[in-house]
Image: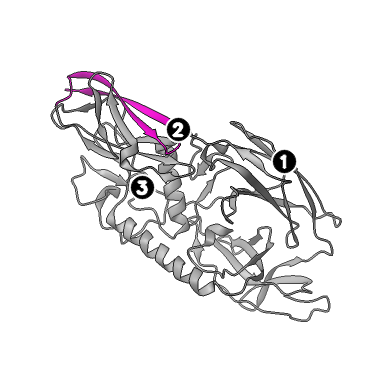
Amino acid sequence: MQDANGQTLSTYHFDARIDDGSGSLVFRELVPWKAGTNQIILKRGITPVAKRSVSGSSPTLKVLRPRDGETWGAKATVSWRGADADGDALTYTVLFNSGDDQRWVTLASGLTRQSVTIDPALLAGSQKAGIKLRASDGVNTTEAYSAGAFIVPDHPPVVSILGAARGRLLRRQSAEFTGAAYDPKYGMLPASNLIWTSNRDGTLGAGGHIKTTKPLSSGAHVITLTATNSRGLTNSRSVNIVVQ
Amino acid sequence: MEWPNARGKAAFGDTRAIEASTKPASDPESYGSIWAQEIAHNFGRMHVSTSHHEMPPTDPAFPYAHGGIAAADNSKHAHDFMSYGANDSQDHTHSWVSPFTYNGLWSSFAASSNVAIQSAQAAVDKLVIGGNFDKNGKVSLYPFHILHTALTSGQGHQWLF
């Protein structure tokens, strides 16, 4: 890092050691920032290979949506207005906070447009959610927050049946089923919240992995895994199988 | 920014997990297994097996044939989620994890926890830099940004970027 007079403020060494499969090397580093940096020079060995100038102005940024009190539906829009007095191209990162803790979850990054559509299905429900926007002009960074708080409704668990392909043949004496359910607010649901049923033989059992205790009826079945979270929200997923 | 294998990209807002194709959220089995693979790439896990045209580099230390989760005959086995093996009519399944991948990830988590503890000192402004050297040595720089954080560079929390 150099100042406006070309004096070195700091030097940081790192290895570009990650091969992405195409023969290139990728690097990502956290470098202690020095106030007064005017230019960042990247050297390979002692040879300069790239540089980035630090412009005089930081971006300006204002979050337009979500608005205070807004309730998110199946799709939600985050929009903002960003500008840079130096005319630098801006890139944006969108982060979400449920209001329950201090964690900010990145929803989208590397954006060059000034809005993004979010699918909140896997976000924890919240009455006090917030959005943080980060704008970068290549170096200078500005952050802005959504005004007040917005509402993300609770979502049902996401249910998955594993390993039972559609139309699969199962032996009636030894049928086994495996599945799981993820709840945006409570994480992976415990086995007791997972119920397996057959459209022909009724309830088969509870758990992430079950073995049927009595032979299934021969023929086609619709096997359904239903998951219920602690707030009573349910979701299910079914698969068609054939028992022989 | 897409880095097959070495760096996974699991983009939440756009409902996609990227390696070869986009999967809809309505297909949670494929969706979840791809997410798992992309996230594991972020923790340093390579593809296992070359039997399903997995993109190189693949992990030469992986001990099982055909991307399976244990020693098994080739006609019937479950695939490790770091392979491209999928469900088919011959009783191959995907979305499972081998002891090799499980232990490797566990070690990565432990290492990243140590890094986080060691670095939980004073938060200061840090410049997040990134880019790549292509195979001809040409450099491309990503947008940098300044982050107020106590974290330091190191394997295990690259996902923060």
Q: Nearer the viewer, residue B46 or B31?
A: B31
Name, please, the residue furthest toward the front.
A231
Q: Kindly identify which residue carries mark 1.
A: A68
Q: Nearer the viewer, residue B88 or A160?
A: A160
* Residue contact between numbered discs 1 and 3, judged by CB atoms under 8 Å: no
User: For the point 69% across and 38% down, which residue is it?
Assistant: A69
Disc 3 versus disc 2: distance between alpha carbons? 29 Å
- Looking at the rendered structure, the kind of residue marked 3 is Phe
**Comparing marks 3 and 2, which lies closer to the viewer?**
2
Q: Magenta residues?
A: A215-244
| Chain to which mark 3 belongs | B
Disc 1 versus disc 2: distance between alpha carbons? 26 Å
User: For the point 50% across and 74% down, which residue is it?
Assistant: B118
Q: Which mark is residue B81?
A: 3
On whether residue A20 falls in the magenta region, the answer is no
Q: Quadrant of residue A172?
A: top left
Q: Kindly identify which residue carries mark 2.
A: A233
- Looking at the rendered structure, the kind of residue marked 2 is Leu
Q: Secondary structure at mark 3?
A: loop
